[in-house]
Amino acid sequence: MPGMVLFGRRWAIASDDLVFPGIFELFLRVLWWIGILSLYLLHRGKLDCAGGVLLSSYLIVLMVLLAVIICTVSAIVCVSMKGTICNPGPRKSMSKLLYVRLALFLPELVWASLGAAWIADGVQCDQAVVNGIIATVVVSWVIIASTVVTIVIVFDPLGGKTPPYPSAGPGHRDSLESSQLPSGLKAAATGVWETRVKVLCCCAGNDDHARAAFSSSAELFSAYFSDTDLVPSDIAAGLALLHQQQDNIGNSQGPDQVISHPPGPSQEADLDAELENCHHYMQFAAAAYGWPLYVYRNPFTGLCRVGGDCCRNRAPEYDLVGGDQFNCHFGSILHTTGLQYRDFIHVSFHDKVYELPFLVALDHRKESVVVAVRGTMSLQDILTDLSAESETLILECEVQDCSAHKGIAQAARYVYGRLVNHGILSQAFSIAPEYRLVIVGHSLGAGAAALLAIMLRNSYPQVRCYAFSPPRGLLSKSLYEYSKSFIVSLVLGKDVIPRLSVTNLEDLKKRILRVIAHCNKPKDPAARLLV
């Protein structure tokens, strides 16, 4: 940090990232130089054949060239070890050394080409000498190709522009957290990230919802990564330092002390009842994932059980299940919930951006109509998660700020339309009018289930929602207060999803910048950041 500037553009690599790559190249170059020297000394008497003078000259010039390269790489490694992450001053000569190193690739490339040409001419010399020279030519081209690949990897598409990054010197640490991008560079960064997201999620479709999700995800990534002069190794180092810092704080404080007040008899009974309900309805949330989760939870018997259902002919039942051509999903749902086929009103595995799979079933044990929404399981679901800006909901309730996560709100609105407009809930309650409505989900499905419960609250006042590990940043404070009476959230241990939000990620970025700025150790040597 900051990113290196070569040929008038910024690259996604810092001047202190060249220690380990340089040591690795140095090791290969020294072994290569020793091997060529040994080959020349042992077989120079056999180079009096036709073309032997050329091969002898080739080996001598190659050894001299390698010696120069070894000296240059050694200097790069030594300079890269100097300074700290945010104090690149002692490494200011790095760009000149890299120019020299890159310039040496030209004679190396020419010499490798000449060596390949001479070998191709069929030089009639000792076979050991010929084989040794073939090996040197191959090694030369491998190193050249590796260098080209490395340049492609560290290429920064925005490097040609000049962002107003703050100084990274030790006297400007606080300014690292306050840099802003001009509108032109911000638009360029968003375009770069949108291209990356489209390439990574090329199988997610190209409809209006997918394009909106691509744009939303690109804005999220560009806003998070493009306003600081961090390279990938800086982020990795910051995470390692932050983890080390948190471990030290935890060790100094000792184990967490939990102060609890014993609940009264009625509160304890309510808590036990809710925990029992969570245990019961979690099976529906798990069933919504279909056969992959069932096989994962039952590694020894799940595949056989589901495989039997896949091969079974259920022609009369096929219309009930959308997107389950081989009946594997529905078979796993039956095994997970313990219900019968006749207990299911609707099962859909239709999966697109903002459109989640879900199931509707009659739970006779709890006398409830259960709607279970599936969580993240596809690229489409990931794009739904990444559409993280807020969206205002139109609700028939007295709540001032009705805003929620855009992608999850869109998904909840889709399920709501299927349940209400297609008459699925009406059909369920026509069979069991005395049952109550229960909506469940896990992860992304938990967020959609919570919003779906809010949307259905007026039509079904007795609705109850059990959200397992719902994403953070889902609801505005007003909606959170409104939903406390009918939504139960369950979070297990240190699950990251209920703690993951745009606000928390911004806080994490500030912490990373702060811990990097106050680090007085080099980044790479001896991997001291991780010990």
Image: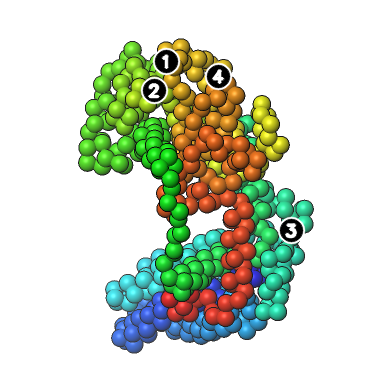
Q: Secondary structure at mark 1?
A: loop
Pointers 1 and 4 in contact (C-beta within 8 Å): no
Q: Is residue 172 left or right of residue 245?
A: right
Q: Which mark, by number, is residue 181?
A: 3
Whether residues under marks 1 and 2 lie with C-beta atoms below 8 angstroms apart, the answer is yes
Check disc 4 and report its element: helix, strand or loop.
Answer: helix
The residue under label 3 is which amino acid type? Leu
Q: CA distance from mark 1 to mark 2?
A: 8 Å
Q: Are marks 3 and 2 in contact (CB under 8 Å)?
A: no
- Between 408 and 353, the residue placed more toward the observer is 408
- Which residue is at the far front? 265
State the separation of the CA atoms marked 2 and 4: 21 Å
Q: Which residue is mark 4?
A: 420
Residue at mark 2: 367
- Residue 325 in view (yes/no): no
Q: Picture coordinates of residue 309 (x, y %)?
A: 27, 25
Q: In the rendered view, would you say 508 is above or below 323?
A: below
The answer to whether the residues at label 4 and label 3 have Cβ atoms under 8 Å apart is no
At 49% from the left and 33% from the top, the residue drawn is 465
Q: What residue sits right under mark 1 in the picture?
A: 432
- Number of dots carrying numbers: 4
**Amino acid type, label 4:** Val
**Between disc 1 and disc 4, whose residue precedes?**
4
